[in-house]
Amino acid sequence: MKRDPIDAFWRRKTLQELTPQEWESLCDGCGKCCLNKVIDDDTDDLYYTEVRCKLLDNKTCQCKQYQNRFDYVPDCVTITPENVAELDWLPNTCAYRRLYFGEDLPNWHYLIAGDKRKMHKKQKSVQGKTVCETGVKELQDHIVIWPLMD
């Protein structure tokens, strides 16, 4: 069921005004932020890999230990209204990034589309495209461009 909430909370509030529940609901669950990235030492260019965090479920694109993730991945990053501008590794489709830069949510986002599966059907998530970091030796051997193809 597609909906276009004209008075939606993300359209009438700033990021700083969102409640914790509203903030969390903006995440579409694509899993792209949970992909390992590589930075070229010479150019500082950032590259996405197909290698996912050990806690990311390849089928659901959800963290298996979200509430306790820092116990397992101490360097996991919490995205906040205060740091979203600094996180240049977030994909262009990221709701937090889009709203920060004055864009609206994409039409496949579940808050508009009314269905969390639409993102997966439109190939906007990492679902089924990743390998777990525990089995990878060289990240640079797994660089991909598809996370940025939106």
Image (cartoon, grey):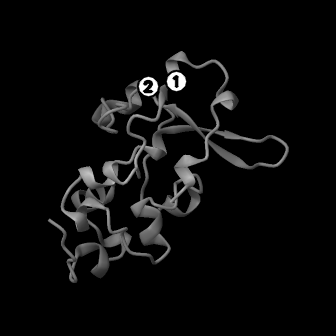
Q: SS of the residue at dot 2? A: loop
Against 57, residue 147 (above or below) is below
What percent of the width, then of the height, locates residue 132? Answer: 47, 24
- Asked whether disc 2 touches disc 1, contact meaning CB atoms under 8 Å apart, the reply is yes
Q: Secondary structure at mark 1?
A: helix
Amino acid under disc 1: Glu
Q: Is residue 81 visible?
A: no
Vertical placement of residue 9 versus 24, above or below: below
Q: Earlier in the sequence, mark 2 or mark 1?
A: 2
Taking the spot 51% from the left edge, 38% from the top edge, the residue there is 35
State the separation of the CA atoms marked 2 and 1: 6 Å
- The answer to whether 104 is drawn above or below residue 68 in the figure is below
Q: Which residue is mark 1?
A: 133
Front-most of 4 and 21?
4
As drawn, 107 above or below 134: below
Quarter of the rendering containing residue 11: bottom left
In percent of the image, x 42 and y 71: which residue is there? 99
| Residue position marked by numbered label 2 in the rendering | 54
Q: Is residue 29 left or right of residue 48?
A: left
In this rendering, position of residue 137 left or right of residue 94: right
Instruction: Report the residue at 22% width, 57% height from top.
Output: 21
**Which quarter of the figure is the N terminus placed in?**
bottom left
Query: Quarter-wise, where is residue 112 in the image?
Result: bottom left
Any part of residue 70 in sight:
yes
